[in-house]
Image (cartoon, rainbow, N blue to C red):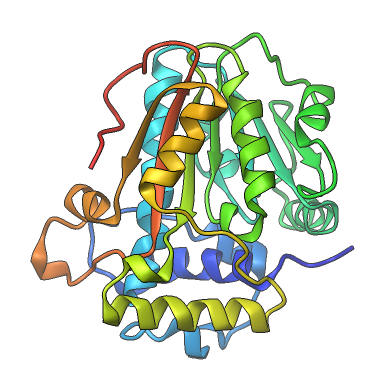
């Protein structure tokens, strides 16, 4: 039973660090991921937890999490009844937000080993697995995850929210295109929120240096970045996949939504952006806005 990879753990720790060191109101409050990860008492002394040097990465992690959960809440209020999390890692939505999650069928799709580890940790912590939470173990590069999703109870003829954050850069362009085509074929009204990595050449010098340093760390951890896309390329891929509506949400827009107060000192690190696309019918609601 494989433990979660270093990226999933780091994400959980940055979420908890946001609550610990950043002034309220917090953009995203998640300390449960820290309990799942169980990093030990000295976790805040890790190099990647330095509040000063990791601040923009932390801001990016909590902003993207808030963006997705705002979208899920909006769509659930409109009657959408399914939520699919691709590459769920140590996501804690089902445990933190039962007032929304219990009205949905939530599907966490992830690698088999880390997912089994997570289930064991939930049991150890006495949190359990409610009836509406479904674990879907799958290897994204080798297995048709949508077949496993249907076998777990997903209803392809009903709209859903599908979230994929921090996943696309680890997959080939072909695997990303296949994912887009499959989700575009879901029921009309299905909304995809997916992050993608910008090519280093689209970043300014300072941001490019941060991006390359992150890429080196990812490769050293055994999870190298494989794919990057310009916003125009990603929008073209989405439309060619069959999405009727597709918009790009930039890091600058996330800043304006969640870090508008200059006094908080938080800004999203550039390099990871959102695609928000709707299958089959005009976009529902006004959550997504192009940048």
What is the total number of numbered labels drawn onto the structure image?
A: 0
Q: Position of residue 73 (x, y in %)?
A: 41, 28
Residue lying at 59% horizontally and 39% vertically, measured from the top left: 94
The answer to whether residue 68 of the structure is visible from this angle is no
Front position in the image: 122 or 254: 254
Q: Position of residue 142 (x, y in %)?
A: 84, 47
Front position in the image: 238 or 21: 238
Residue lying at 40% horizontally and 86% vertically, measured from the top left: 50
Outermost residue, left side: 262
The answer to whether residue 32 of the structure is visible from this angle is yes
Q: Quadrant of the C terminus?
A: top left
Front position in the image: 236 or 89: 236
Q: Quadrant of the N terminus?
A: bottom right
Q: Position of residue 282 (x, y in %)?
A: 37, 13
Front position in the image: 45 or 272: 272
Left or right of 113: which side holds 34? left
Residue lying at 39% horizontally and 32% vertically, measured from the top left: 71
Left or right of 291: which side holds 40? right
Res. 288 image quadrant = top left
Res. 184 image quadrant = top right
Q: Position of residue 231 (x, y in %)?
A: 37, 48
- Give above or below for 70 relative to 176: above
Left or right of 122: which side holds 177? left
Residue lying at 83% horizontally and 31% vertically, measured from the top left: 148
């Amino acid at each position: 039973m494989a433990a979660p990879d270093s990226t999933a753990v780091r994400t959980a720790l940055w979420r908890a660090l946001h609550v610990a060191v950043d002034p309220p109101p917090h953009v995203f409050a998640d300390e449960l991921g820290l309990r799942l990860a169980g990093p030990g008492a000295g976790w805040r002394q890790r190099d990647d937890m330095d509040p000063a040097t990791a601040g923009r990465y932390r801001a990016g992690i909590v902003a993207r999490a808030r963006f997705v959960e705002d979208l899920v809440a909006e769509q659930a209020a409109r009657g959408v009844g399914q939520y699919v999390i691709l590459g769920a890692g140590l996501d804690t939505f089902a445990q933190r937000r039962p007032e929304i999650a219990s009205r949905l069928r939530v599907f966490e799709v992830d690698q088999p080993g880390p997912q089994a580890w997570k289930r064991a940790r939930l049991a150890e912590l006495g949190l359990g697995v409610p009836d509406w939470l479904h674990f879907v173990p799958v290897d994204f590069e080798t297995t048709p995850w949508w077949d496993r999703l249907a076998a777990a109870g997903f209803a392809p003829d009903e709209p859903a929210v599908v979230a994929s954050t921090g996943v696309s850069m680890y997959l080939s362009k072909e695997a990303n295109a296949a994912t887009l085509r499959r989700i575009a074929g879901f029921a009309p009204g299905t909304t995809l929120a997916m992050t993608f990595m910008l090519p280093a050449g689209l970043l300014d010098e300072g941001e490019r240096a941060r991006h390359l340093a992150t890429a080196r760390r990812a490769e050293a951890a055994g999870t190298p970045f494989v794919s990057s896309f310009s916003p125009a390329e990603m929008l073209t891929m989405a439309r060619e996949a069959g999405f009727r509506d597709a918009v790009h949400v930039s890091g600058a827009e996330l800043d304006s939504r969640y870090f508008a107060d200059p006094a908080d000192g938080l800004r999203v690190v550039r390099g990871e952006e959102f695609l928000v696309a709707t299958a089959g019918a005009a976009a529902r609601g006004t959550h997504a806005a192009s940048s």
